[in-house]
Amino acid sequence: MVTSIILINTERTAVNQVAEEIAEIEGISEVYSVSGNYDLIAIARVKTNDDLADLVTTKMCCIEGIVHSETTLAFKAYSRHDLESMFSVGL
């Protein structure tokens, strides 16, 4: 499984529309509107690097309102949330 964090700048008036369109893409698990240097952060979880390349260069590139994006790959997860969900099965 390949996990990627995609940092996105949008046109000012397009944040909500872009977020909704990105959230509909298969392989995107979450989209957050955020403060700071970026408008949105999307989390992609796909099977292969080729799937990620297709998601970013084919599916996301067609969305009107995206001004800039930066894609980063996650190497390893250090998440208490993941551990808690693993042990809470059936509770």
Image: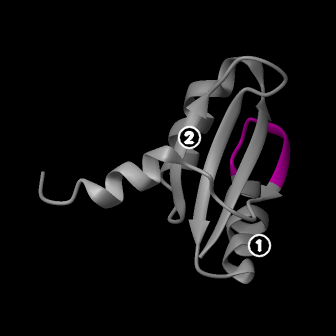
Of the residues shown, which amino acid type is indicated by label 2? Val
Position of residue 31 relative to residue 5, above or below, is above
Up/down of 9 relative to 54, above or below: above
Marker count (numbered): 2
Which residue is located at x 66 percent, y 23 percent? 34
Residue drawn at x 44%, y 45% as measured from the top left: 81
State the CA–CA distance, disc 1 to disc 2: 18 Å
State which quadrant residue 74 falls in. Answer: bottom right
Q: Position of residue 50 (x, y in %)?
A: 73, 82
Q: Residues within 10 Å of mark 1 (few under 14, many from 20)?
A: few
Which amino acid does the dot numbered 1 rest on? Answer: Ala
* Coordinates of residue 71 in the picture (x, y in percent): 81, 54
> Which of the numbered marks, if any, corresponds to residue 53?
1
Q: Would you say 85 lies left or right of 80 here?
A: left
Q: Secondary structure at mark 1?
A: helix
Residue hosting label 2: 31
